Image (cartoon, coloured by chain):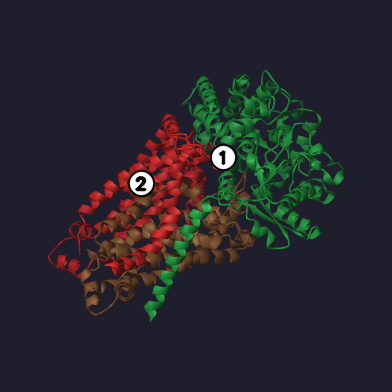
Chain colours: A brown, B green, C red
Amino acid sequence: MNKQKKLILRIISVLSAGLFLVPFYIMLINSFKTKKQLFLDTLGFPKTFDFNNYIVAWERLEFLKVFFNSLIITVGSLTIVIIFSSMAAWMLQRTKSKLSTFIFFVFVASMLIPFQAVMLPLVRIMGKLNLLNMPGLIFMYLGFQSSLSIFLYHGFVKGIPKALDEAAIIDGCNSFQIFWYIIFPLLKPITITVSVLNAVWIWNDYLLPSLVINKEASHTIPLRIFFFFGEYTKQWHLAMAGLTLAIIPVIIFYFFAQKHIIKGVTDGSVK
Amino acid sequence: MKSKGKLMVILSLVLVFGLLITGCGADDTKSTTENSSDENSAAKVKVNIFQFKVEVKDALEDAAEKYMAENPNVELKIQTVGGGDDYGAALRSKFASGNEPAVFNVGGPQDVADWKNKLEDLSDQSWVDLAYNGVLDGVTVDDKVFGLPFNQEGYGFIYNKSIFKKAGIEAESIKSYAELKAAVEKLDSQKEELGLKSVFAFPAKETWVTGLHLSNAALSNEFENVLKAYESKEVDFKYGEGLKKLIDLQADYAYKPDGTKGSLNAVDYATQVEELFSLEQVAIIQQGNWAYGSIAGIDKQVAQNVGFLPMPVVGSTEDSIPVGIPMYWAVNNAKSKEVKDAAKDFLSWLYTSEQGKKIVINDFGFIPALRGYEGPELEPSDPLARDILKYSNQDRTMPWVFMGYPSGWGMNVLGTNIQSYLAGDMTWDQLVKDSQKEWAKAREE
Amino acid sequence: MKKNKLIFWAFVGPSLLAFTLVVLAPLLMGIYYSFTNWNGIAANVSFVGLDNYIEMFNDSSFLDSFIFTTKFTIVSVIAVNAIGFALALLVTRGLKISNFLRTIFFMPNLIGGLILGFIWQFIFTKGFAALGELTGQGWLLGWLSNQETGFWGLAILLAWKMSGYVMVIYVAGIQGIPEELVEAAKIDGANAWERVKHIVFPLIRPAFTASLFLTLSNSFKLFDPNLSLTSGGPARSTEMLALNIYKTAFTFREMGVAQAKAVIFLIVVGIVTLTQVHFTKKGEVEM
């Protein structure tokens, strides 16, 4: 019975995984085709594995350079988002006051604001503050991502017994010590979730960097990939190769991070 | 100790943020957006160019290198926006952020009106006298010229010469709607032998093809030029019947993904040009000379064997193709004199010097909008561009007036109405009435 | 007391400041602009009162896109959460390939929304067509050429993209459930469904609140894939609210009207989502 169940589960898993992979399959096979082949036979396997698209895409993207730009922006934003929003969430959850509730409410409600509604005034303000390009972008991600992150942390902090905080106060810890040495480690599972969700968002974002970054030297990967999408037509074969290049490092990272997620979750549940 | 350090970091960040906020309030009153320190700090004159044509990005950067080699005191920085659609949004946000480019692109009368406070008068530039008749209309206000034309572009019915030859059709003799229709019917009757899926590929999804370009054939006969269209309070559809005929002809004989006319609304540029036409599955498409690169990207032989048929509007011009200026270069008048002079000099150099002209023709693949591009080295290399010059020389062109339509009207009103018409959700009369109503409404304000 | 306040601001301040500058201030400026004739360029704007709001209500495309967006949101929220939760259960069953599966289900999020739309457009128009011609299935042809296929195209895209996302949140919730509880229930003879119903559901209520909220706001605000998949077409029949606002601003160049729409949009979304949060939160179990 149990074995049979496991088998069914496995079959379902493999089938659904296959379904999820179809678009990636299409991306990958078409990255090896010439433009003509791509139109003649969209779903089929490429006749020859020609890496030419990858060579062209690599050069046109200046891949190494833009990869590091994307990396700096993502890691930089992520670090400050994690630190500041976990702090804020903990404080907001633990402080029972009208002000605290109100601030949390504003953060959460703002997740509903469509980016398009604030886009133009935003660049106006940031331009005046001289907060453009990479530093400005990182600062803006703190502003945009803190809502979601605080929201997620807030939910998790609720699950951490208040008794822990109180015990630490008795031990003579100040608020910062309590947070860093006791609370923050317990937040690990949700920290990883928050990191992953934020990282993919920042890594892939197109609209905000396109408005804020005005130096070619600071371009991120998505900005460059759009050079394959011209006024009239799209260089599908190059775009597919470029996309594959862009995704490989993220997948490697994600596989690597998976291990830590498991570890993080087990660490967190040992209370 | 450790936590103290962290505390310090946090407190200093709070302090910095606090300063930023006050900085915001103090700065807000200043209306100037010019960032002069940026330009004076280095000895070089920095000119930022913000342009939208991804297709010429690399060639333009090479041109800038060459210019800088000759003019070491100038530093040109070129930024290109990808994806086509977003240029207007990106440009607005550039200006909003105070990071104004020195050189940018404007499309026509509406852009000129929107940006009029930012546009430098370019009337004294040497290229003004070289411009062909009418090409500066869209950017001239009160006899002042505010833009340098990018290039000329033209469109019509691109046809595959070898298919026409096989079918025994004399393309050169097609100069009216009746003759075009006869040719289409003849092709249709031989579909199988010619290996065609259908005669046309009609990309109703691309509302710029239908709502701007196709409609222009009829409306340019109604309005004469772009300024008249821009100033007109209403649209008559005087040659609406001719427009309907052109839409119906293409739709009737087009490749339809699921057999219904409504499914034409999913056919896009890539399907039309790169797939159906370049793979020789259709014989005629309504497109412009820019399609050459797309066709050549698929099949170089097909690309060498193409030409333009006219777009015959019944009741009006039947032997012409629409030729016009897609975009203009503009100079930001808020910049310092040195920057503006350098910007103007670069543009003149690009379009009028011997070296620049070669770049414009050979590297950009442009059809010039200025005189003085004679000589064997400056012949356009692709057959579509050559055909457009031929039509120009025979005086068989009509102007582009769609830049003078109300903002968004062409693509998002007429173009989408054509989609509803094809899907059977709207009759032709409803299409005309609704489009007229929306035009008048947009002009009210 | 004073010290407490200082500590409070030290913790909350940095996020709040960035947030104020990046979100709140522009939002307020935007609301202000909704009462003016601002065109996005000129520095001098004049006050026009409620004109923009009146014009907005006369714009039938706004109402159309409102209805479309609402329908889309209902379908996607249900689909994404159902699939996401099912996937979360699947990958927490201790199968050897669980990690691998998690990676795969989450992978769609590694591609940005605009490009995702392009890829799916390619699949719907080219891939489906090829498959349809191969198998003779007529319904696979002509996708994205009418409102119906455009709607389902968007729904499929979002379900594919977001299911893995909410799965991650559900997984965090499920793994937060103490192992002993599940074991105890097993010993008590509860079957798999009973365990899910009586233990998993109540204990992941916070995760459920979060996921519901996220899917609700994400599908209501959907923009990037809408722009690249259908661009609102054909005949503006698949134009969602965010795209409608964007087009009002940049295609029709009516910045004031666009800002007015954004304000109304915000109010509606706010009411809907906060009501949802209020009701789902009621049932959460406090630990």
Outermost residue to the left: C188
Q: Residue at x 31, y 57 (%)?
A: A104
Q: Quadrant of residue A91?
A: bottom left
Q: How many marks?
A: 2
Location of residue C128 with respect to A90 vertically, above or below? above
- Can residue A31 be seen by looking at this rendering? no
Q: What residue is pinned by disc 1?
A: B268
The dot on residue C56 is: none
User: How far across and how far down the image is residue B121, in percent?
Assistant: 72, 41
Q: Label 2 marks which chain's residue?
A: C
Query: Can the viewer see residue B130 in this picture?
Result: yes
The answer to whether B204 appears left or right of C57 in the picture is: right
Quadrant of the drawing holding the N terminus of chain A: bottom left
Picture quadrant where residue B160 is located:
top right
Q: Residue at x 39, y 73 (%)?
A: B7
Query: Tag 1: residue type?
Result: Asp
Q: Disc 2 on helix, strand or loop?
A: helix
Could you tell me residue A45's position as x and y percent? 54, 55
> How many angstroms separate mark 1 from mark 2 (CA)?
27 Å
Quarter holding the C terminus of chain A is: bottom left
Pointers 1 and 2 within a single chain: no
Q: How far across and down, in percent of the image, does residue B402 sit?
A: 63, 31
Q: Residue at x 52, y 63 (%)?
A: A135
Q: Residue at x 35, y 55 (%)?
A: A107
Q: On what subunit does the disc labeled 1 rest?
A: B
Depth check: give the residue in front, A269 or B206: A269
Q: Position of residue B348 (x, y in %)?
A: 78, 47
Label 2 sits on residue = C76
- Report the front residue among B268 and B189: B268
Amino acid at circle 2: Ser
